[in-house]
Image (spheres, rainbow, N blue to C red):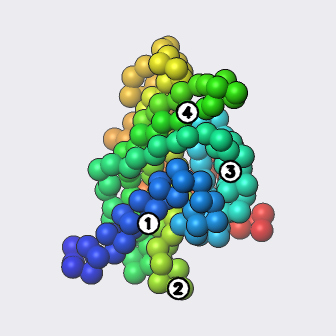
C-alpha cells in the first residue's frame, strides 16, 4: 500500500462520513452527491426493493425518513483501492431511528455491514457506486424483528462469508453481475 493509497482511503472515509451525517441531517440534495448517478442500492434485508440510480434512491428514502430522527454510524472500515478509479469497502454499521408519537412513536435499532464499491469520477471525487446493506440484527421497541428467532445463527439468513461462491459481486469484480439478474445496462 502506498502513501497515495492511504490518501485515497481517507478520502473514501470522508465520503462515508458525509453519507451518514447528511442523511441524519436530512440534507437530501447534498446527500445525493455522495452517490454516482448510476448507483445500485440493495437494502433488501430491510424489505426494500433493489434501486437503480441516485435520484430514484433519494426519492425512495426521503419520504420514509421525513419527520424521523435518525442516527447512523459506520465503524471499522475495511477499504481497498482496486484501481486508479475504483475501490471497495466493508463498514460495520449501527442505526437508530425514532418516529414521533403522532407516527406511532416506534424506536428502531439495527446493526450490520455495508458492502460498497466506489468510483472516482471525472471531477476527482469518490462516490458510492454500489451499496449493499446486510443486516445482523434489528429491534423495534426493544423486540428482535430480524433475524426471526427461528433464523438465529451466522449462516441462517445469508451465505457464509468464508464460502467464496457466496461473495457479493462487487467483492470480486465491480463490473460483475449477480447471476440471477438481467444486465442493468439493458434497462437504460
Q: Quadrant of residue 58?
A: bottom right
Circle on res. 52: none
Label 4 Cα crowd, 10 Å radius (few <14 / some 14-19 / many 20+): many
Q: Mark 1, mark 4: which one is toward the viewer?
A: 4
Q: Secondary structure at mark 3?
A: helix
Q: Closer to us: mark 3 or mark 2?
A: 3
Residue of label 1:
15
Please name the residue shown 46% across and 39% down the image: 95
For the residues marked 1 and 4, what is the alpha-carbon distance in whole angstroms?
A: 25 Å
Q: CA distance from mark 3 to mark 2?
A: 26 Å
The image shows residue 98, relative to residue 164, as above or below, that is above
Q: Which residue is mark 4?
A: 98
Q: Nearer the viewer, residue 61 or 4?
A: 61
- Left or right: where does residue 30 sit relative to residue 50? left
| Element carrying mark 1 | helix
Of pointers 3 and 1, the one earlier in the residue sequence: 1
Q: Earlier in the sequence, mark 2 or mark 4?
A: 4
**Which residue matches tag 3?**
62
Q: Is residue 184 visible?
A: no
Q: Left or right: where does residue 99 sit relative to residue 20? A: right
Secondary element under disc 4, as helix, strand or loop, is strand
Amino acid at each position: 500500500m502506498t502513501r497515495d493509497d492511504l490518501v485515497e482511503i481517507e478520502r473514501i472515509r470522508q465520503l462515508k462520513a458525509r453519507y451518514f451525517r447528511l442523511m441524519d441531517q436530512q440534507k437530501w440534495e447534498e446527500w445525493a452527491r455522495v452517490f454516482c448517478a448510476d448507483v445500485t442500492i440493495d437494502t433488501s434485508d430491510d424489505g426494500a426493493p433493489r434501486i437503480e440510480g441516485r435520484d430514484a434512491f433519494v426519492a425512495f428514502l426521503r419520504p420514509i425518513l421525513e419527520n424521523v430522527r435518525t442516527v447512523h454510524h459506520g465503524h471499522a472500515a475495511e477499504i481497498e483501492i482496486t484501481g486508479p478509479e475504483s475501490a471497495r469497502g466493508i463498514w460495520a454499521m449501527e442505526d437508530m431511528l425514532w418516529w414521533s408519537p403522532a407516527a406511532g412513536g416506534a424506536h428502531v435499532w439495527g446493526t450490520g455491514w455495508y458492502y460498497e464499491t466506489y468510483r472516482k469520477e471525472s471531477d476527482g471525487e469518490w462516490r458510492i457506486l454500489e451499496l449493499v446493506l446486510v443486516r445482523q440484527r434489528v429491534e423495534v421497541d426493544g423486540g428482535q424483528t430480524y433475524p426471526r428467532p427461528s433464523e438465529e445463527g451466522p449462516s441462517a439468513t445469508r451465505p457464509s462469508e468464508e464460502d467464496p461462491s457466496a461473495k457479493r459481486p462487487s467483492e470480486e469484480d465491480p463490473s460483475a453481475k449477480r447471476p440471477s439478474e438481467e444486465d442493468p445496462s439493458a434497462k437504460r
